[in-house]
Amino acid sequence: MEPLQENFDLQEEIIQYLNGELSAEAKLDFESRVKNDDVLANELQNYRNIMNGIEHWGESNLRAFIAQVDRDLEQQQFFTATIPAAKPKLISFFSENRKFAMAAVFIGIVLFAFLLVYLNKESGKNSNLYAEFYQADANTTQTVLSQLDPYGFIPSNVPIDSIQWALENYQQGNYKASLSVFERCTNEEGIQNLCKYYVALNYLGLDDANKATSILNDLCASPNHELKTGACWYLALTLIKLDKEDSRIPTLLHEVRADRDSPFSRDAEKLLAQWIN
């Protein structure tokens, strides 16, 4: 049997995975373990069922359910019954109350999942929306890779192959490696916006939304550059991720939606509808 703390850590990791709160590296590691561990895969499915049940019931229905079971337990004197010392009567007691004992255990499991999902500081509607809509920027990355000019587009201290290498690492989810290159060129004329953009995206990939926010805010506020719409999209997502009820969020989403040439336009329209509702 697993020690209590290890069991709790595993349960918390499962909830974080289902809630989209693991970093990209941690998510890949977890999914690899699930493929090779039938027990973990079964536990994951159990928690998925529980969380789906919570979402289906809603908080008010969950409370009503618990209250009803509690009344049933009281009517059966589950909480006040004395347990005789004789072993046969002890067995009989638990046999007669098996249904209610199982219900009490179920309530405990549901409440555990409920607390982790709904009372976690980054959980709830905002965290779910972020997990639903956040994706690495594959479109821009592929476009930039195809447009790199080996004849002088990149300054001599940041060679073309370094930018290409950093972009490819971003595509592959190697965010620390990619970040190490883009941090070096944020002041280089002609490519500073590109480098800042990928610094911010790599921070998001590393699940560090706080560091990404100020960079994205500056890029979104700067006029007339090709990465502006992407920066505004990721800024809106980052504010949602940080659980901020920021009045800029719908404004940002309207702006992204209006750019019909952007790959983020359709998602911005969907997210805007959910955010308003």
Image (cartoon, rainbow, N blue to C red):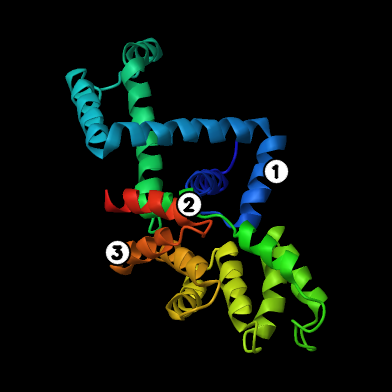
Label at residue 133: 2
Label at residue 32: 1
| Image coords of residue 164 (percent x, y) | 77, 70
**Three-letter code, disc 3:** Glu
Residue under the image location 47 percent in, 72 percent down:
210
Q: Provide the secondary structure element on which disc 1 rests.
A: helix
Does residue 192 lie above or below 110 as drawn? below
Of the two numbered discs 2 and 3 in the rendering, the one whose residue sits closer to the viewer: 2
Position of 276 with respect to 124 (left or right) is left
**In this orientation, which residue lies closer to the viewer: 115 or 145?**
145
Which callout, 1 or 3, points at the residue further toward the start of the chain?
Answer: 1
The quadrant holding residue 162 is bottom right
Which callout, 2 or 3, points at the residue further toward the start of the chain?
Answer: 2
Count neighbours of disc 2 (C-alpha within 10 A) and say few if under 14, some if 14 to 19, many if 20 or more: some
| Image coords of residue 1 (percent x, y) | 60, 35
**In this orientation, which residue lies closer to the viewer: 176 or 41?**
176
Q: Provide the secondary structure element on which disc 2 rests.
A: helix
Q: CA distance from mark 2 to mark 3?
A: 17 Å
Of the two numbered discs 1 and 3 in the rendering, the one whose residue sits closer to the viewer: 3
Label at residue 47: none
**In this orientation, which residue lies closer to the viewer: 23 or 201?**
201
Label at residue 245: 3
**Three-letter code, disc 2:** Phe
Residue farthest along the front direction in this orientation: 261
| Image coords of residue 243 (percent x, y) | 36, 62
Residue under the image location 37 percent in, 12 percent down:
95
**Three-letter code, disc 1:** Ser
Residue under the image location 57 percent in, 47 percent down:
6
Residue under the image location 64 percent in, 46 percent down:
30
Regarding residue 12, the answer to whether it shows in the image is yes
Does residue 159 lie above or below 271 as drawn? below
